[in-house]
Image (cartoon, rainbow, N blue to C red):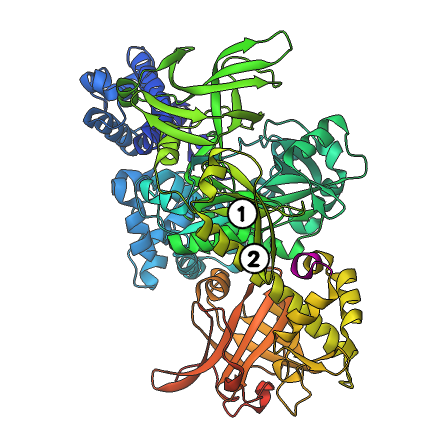
Amino acid sequence: MPHSGVFFRKKNTGLAKRVLDFYEDIRYKYLSAKEDPKEYGKQWRSSVKKIRNDFDGLSNFTTEMKRYLDEEIVFSKSTLDPESHNARELYASIKKLRYNSDELNDPFAKQLGEEVIATLVKEPTIYAMFIHYALRTHAHSIPSASWEAKDLRPDAITEGAMGLDLRMGDIPIYIIEHYGDDKDTSKVKSKFKGALNLLREVYLIDSNEEDWDKLVAIDIKKAEKSKDEKSEIEFITPNKPMYRIFEVNDIKELKGFSGEWLVQEKYDGIRIQLHKIDNKVKIYTYNKKDITDKCKNVAEKLKAKKFGDSIFDAELILYDNDEPLHRADTIAHLFKDKYKDATLKAKVFDVLNHEGDNLMENPLRERINTLFYQLSQHSSDELSFPSKKNTRIADSLQEIEKYSKDIMDLPTSEGVVIKDLESTYYVGAKKNPKWIKMKKYVDLDVIVLEKKSTKSNLYSYSLGVGPLTGEEAREYNGTELNGVTYLKVGKALNTKENVDVGDIVRVKVDEVKRSNGGYSLYTAKVIEIPEVDTPEKVITLDLLSKEGRKSLKYDVQDALLKYTITDGVHGSADIIMKSNYDGFTIYGFDGDSLMEKNALVDIDVWKQQLTEITKAKSAEARVFIKQYLHKEDEDEKGIHVANIMKVCKENIPNLTEDLWDNDTKKLQNWMNDFDDFIRLPNKHFTANKDKLIKEGSSESKTGEFKLLMRKDKNIELVINVNDKTLLWVIDIEDAEDIFNLFGKSGKFPAEIGEVSQAEKLLDKGEITLGAQRHGYHEYRIDGNKFDTRLHFRVVPVKEQDKWLVWTGVKQKMLDESKDEGIWDITDDRHKKLTMQIA
């Protein structure tokens, strides 16, 4: 809600507030239940029952209800079904109550009905009138003569209506919250500035600048809550993904998404919430346990003024030096002080409140932009914010799959969360219907339906999923627990975890099969007590039980000769083998599970994947050795292979073991296979300089870059290479365009700059020069936020030559034969082209 000034405060009666509260509550529950009746149907039914109780009352509110609500519909049995015609009719009647009740002092709702938003975004004059009505503390509109002086219609809407006394920044939020039901609200914020400017012009005809400043000023009453009020900001129930998938194509079976996604790392830690108000920091676990004293390093970082008053959604991970530990270790450290020398670090992935503004109703697109462009540059080791390495925007299933694989390779990842970019944060709901999770391995959250114990203090549980909808209850034989029906799906035997009937446990399974009576979990094993209080839905098991899920993922273990592969469904298989640049030697399988039995069938699939691993290792080793030779062998006399092996053992020991078995002879044979190296007499090698630099040139192909926001809100790409600073200026419209440029291949005008006007650092890192010629300059940047191929090219735009810049969909750099060595862009014959179009 807006921070101050809801209009019903000005009335003497509480009935107006009752009507608005009633509408907002019903609106949320009806729309939620309509979209997902399985999850929210119970809330809707409770609301209908409450309406029935109020309908039989004697209060003024009952009298007002009866003016708009039909008794027959209120008490109809079908109204309890949120998908029914009667439920829709009841909700429509409640909307009429909200917009037409005489108890509400809302001139816009009375005159425009449900067309408030459509009218405001279409007619700037009326939007300007609304802003004045929202800002003022009295009941008087701007004089007619002021409007007429601008050839505009006078304000015949708000005269006599007490103003809302809102903060200026809260006005668009207020409009969306109070008039946005089932409406297109996308232009409310973008049209606000123009309407405000128009209001200022009209207002100043009959008033002075000082009066204007008073109207829009952020004074004590409007802008600043008292410390007591601020301290009352409540802990927010964390949203969790409502759906679980096991391969990206499963998304096709889920409905109601916009088609644009945010793919984020799902950390292997515990969920936390960071609160900062007036420099007072509190850190809570997912269930509101205060752990601030346990996270003093994180709390100290958050106290910095640059973060403002904020609430962040985050994950807490325990590190042993630079090694991230597992979730169980994090919990043990927090509550049992198990690891004395380890360090807790917070990974922020969402912002719920920033600088006093409630962002939970804002689309995720806006919230992630706040993190990217206002906070990510303040990331530290103890408190980090999203970067392109762990957070990517996708607009297709192919992109989701690619980004998910990249993110899952991160050491702190246990999977990804895929979020609709238009999703808001569901206040009061634990699962967000616009969020989906996908893990590296298969585990399920199930409810304990029955419990048995043994003399040796082990426990066995009957497990269930659900609760079942009416339709599912008719299809399956359910089991009732505490008045709710669940589907029994199997047992977990002989575990040390001691929980009660009705509790949720997380189990790892080898296989899910569908049978006539439902679904069965095979080899279910309790692995932990999760941070949830509801089990999986039946649709999750339906997805798992379908055939054809052979999209293998692998995790190379540290153990010598052992590779673990999993198809994401049936479990994992440990393959006893050796892999190097020569190929594979398979010694067998460590076990006899279903996955091990399937592994030979899929041998070509996972063999290809392991080949890709070896290629990646080989490429990494080539880069290291080339750089070493280029630095240490300037006279090109060569370095003996034994000395190269010694350096490799010291700096890349894992690669040395995996590729060459620490055998100098194998390293020598490997180097012979690549033209990156030139073999000299007596087992000496030197780097092939033609693979690094053009022949006859001494310029470097690598340097550093900075991405900076300018005072004019355009951005600069500053390149430092060969002891020279080069400057590109890129024309953007808003902060979102930065990600459109670097993350979605958007094309933007550019020009070669001379003097920096930088104001704020956005990103920095290493840059590699690709093809450099007149009219074309190619780069690869590797920064904290962006890691991509970037190229500037002269292109005709409206019959004029202009520089355009975009990122490459294809990440492979052009062949070196395309390079003409014009790396200094001030030598380019197109250097005088500007961004402006005549």
Mark 2 or mark 1: which comes first in sequence? Answer: 1
* Magenta highlight range: 657-662
Q: Amino acid at mark 1?
A: Tyr
Q: Is residue 743 left or right of residue 616?
A: left
Q: For residue 636: magenta? A: no
Q: Residues within 10 Å of mark 1 (few under 14, many from 20)?
A: many
Q: Could you say where residue 67 lies in the image, as x and y percent from the top left?
A: 23, 22
Please tell me in which quadrant of the rendered image residue 319 appears.
top right
In contact (CB < 8 Å): disc 2 and disc 1: yes
Q: Amino acid at mark 2?
A: Ile
Query: What residue sits 63% from the left and 90% below the top?
Result: 695
The answer to whether any part of residue 710 appears in the image is no
Q: Which secondary structure, mark 1? A: strand
Tell me residue 81's x, y (percent).
26, 23
Label 2, label 1: how far apart the Cα atoms are? 10 Å
Q: Which residue is mark 2?
A: 613
Q: On the rendered structure, is 56 left or right of 492?
A: left
| Mark 2 closeness class: few <14, some 14–19, many ≥20 residues within 10 Å | some
Tell me the tag on residue 795: none
Q: Where is 813 relative to 51, above or below?
A: below
- Name the quadrant containing residue 753: bottom right
**Left or right: 587 with respect to 569?**
right
* Residue 736 percent coordinates (x, y): 48, 60
Q: Which residue lies under the disc numbered 1? A: 554
Q: Identify which residue is drawn at 72% across, 44% down.
A: 303
